[in-house]
Amino acid sequence: MKFLLVTDLDNTLVGDDRATLALNQRLRSLRSQFCLVYATGRSYTSTCELIAQKQLLDPDYLIAGVGSEIYQNGTLDLDWATHLSHNWDKLAVASIAQQFSQLELQSPLEQNPWKMSFFWKKHRQQQPPFSAIYSKKYLPPDSRLKSFLAAT
């Protein structure tokens, strides 16, 4: 029977180089006994760079981009990508986000087809409450969104 080992990377598996090295050596000796999964908010590219830099074990699965990408042995899970793509409207998200001056799009490396990532710029004009995002004032003229609002 195999065990499932799922871990975050930053300040969990990685953060203390000596401890990470010792753990990796121990895990390497037991590698056939578990399925290894890294779950991280990092982008796929950034995660692969960290795995190489810290000489981490290659995972069986990698959940990257705050769950928006799943890879099995380095191959994108197309079923997950298809599931996330259903009713995902990146243009609608971008349209709404443009209305908030405090949001700053993160670098292209942090973006992927199934999510948009932003920084929150502090010390700008007062942000409306989060609930205001769902008001008609902040939504683009999209009948699906208006229908959603009417139903909630």
Image (cartoon, rainbow, N blue to C red):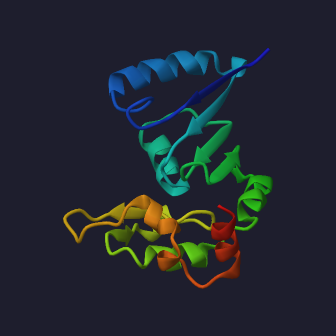
Q: Position of residue 74 (x, y in %)?
A: 67, 49
Quick check: 43 above or below 72?
Answer: below
Identified at 62% across, 34% down, the residue is 37
Instruction: For the C terminus, give its image quadrant.
Output: bottom right
Q: Image check: 100 left or right of 71?
A: left
Q: Image check: 82 left or right of 8?
A: right
Identified at 41% across, 78% down, the residue is 99
Residue 105 falls in image quadrant: bottom left
Q: Out of 71 and 79, give the one closest to the viewer.
A: 79
Residue 19 falls in image quadrant: top left
Q: Out of 14 and 125, give the one closest to the viewer.
A: 125
Quick check: 100 above or below 27?
Answer: below
Quick check: 34 above or below 133?
Answer: above
Q: Out of 53 and 107, give the one closest to the viewer.
A: 107
Quick check: 138 above or below 79?
Answer: below
In the displayed orientation, state which residue is furthest to the left.
Answer: 123
Identified at 67% across, 49% down, the residue is 70
Q: Out of 96 and 63, give the one closest to the viewer.
A: 96
Q: Position of residue 89 (x, y in %)?
A: 65, 73
Instruction: For the N terminus, give its image quadrant.
Output: top right
Q: Image check: 7 left or right of 79?
A: left
Q: Position of residue 20 (x, y in %)?
A: 42, 25
Q: Position of residue 146 (x, y in %)?
A: 65, 76
